[in-house]
Amino acid sequence: MIDRTIELLDRYVFPDVGAKAATAVRSAQSAGRYPDGLEPDALADLVTEDLQTINGDKHLRLQFTSEALPLSTGDETADEAEERAQEVREAARTGGGFAKVERLDGNVAYLEIDLLWPPEIAAPAATAAMTLADGADGLVLDLRRCRGGSPYQVAFLCSYLFGPEPVHLNDLYFRASDETRQFWTSSFVPGPRFGSERPVVVLTSGSTFSGGEELAWDLKELGRATLIGETTRGGAHPVDRIQVHPHLRVTIPIARSISPRTGRNWEGVGVVPDIEVVASAALDRALDHLRTLTS
């Protein structure tokens, strides 16, 4: 498992950092830091700690999975098909990532998003949520527990929050192919569009991560939403996931986000809210904010 983890570090988005991380793990192994008989969760914690000593990348880790999952086969097509089947099952159990959809006092629509599953899995859930938000005077997107997700779902959801003219959201640079992929809103969405005029508030916390951070970052940079809460965790590198043990998988960053407006991203620093409050108070503060805009 250690050898396979070190081998996979060759894919890391920054080659020099990947090489340093490999050296750190190999040195720890030689020093006896990973003795025989360690439980998988304990091994995951130790290796992750060593991997992240180089640059603090929270996406770079040996991740423990409580559910036993099939080992990666080396056949990328088969591996991707199995991962997609797992995602479909999990998304079906969790409302496509939408933990809660409500209409609050003051005619405010409230969407709590825990995970941004890819549109091919969860676009119907996003469409249903935005359809229920239609007619509201304001919208709250609660990302305080959002642990990440697909940049394609970010773009799909953002498409409801602008007009039909496409808006450039974000870019991803992929090291392996040396290509930069652009992400734009769509000129067409299923169901009603919330549009670009009604106010939107995004709630963040210190747990908001990855794809959830991108959604907050894009909407803040474009001036489409007010962010209220805490600075987010700071993970801007999309990953591949390779199962190396039934309960362990390597998550290896293979790309990096690039703002088309500034060239920057939120890696290591997080997304800073417009209005900083403790996460537990963010919803009440958001409702007060929206009342000043809609009353």
Image (spheres, grey):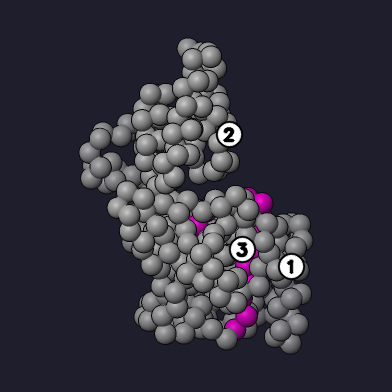
Q: 60 above or below 214?
A: above
- Label 1: which secondary element: strand
Quarter of the image with the C terminus in it: bottom right
Q: Amino acid at mark 3?
A: Asp
Look at mark 2 in the image and give the residue it sits on. 53
Find residue 227 and report its image quarter.
Answer: bottom right
Find residue 58 and report its image quarter.
Answer: top right
Look at mark 1 in the image and give the residue it sits on. 275
Q: Residue at x 33, y 58 (%)?
A: 179
Q: Position of residue 132 (x, y in %)?
A: 51, 75
Look at mark 3 in the image and give the residue it sits on. 142
Q: Nearer the viewer, residue 234 or 73?
A: 234
Q: Position of residue 162 (x, y in %)?
A: 49, 81
Q: Nearer the viewer, residue 175 or 36?
A: 175
Label 2: few (<14), some or many (≥20) within 10 Å?
few
Drawn side of residue 100 relative to residue 159, left or right: right
- Label 3: which secondary element: strand
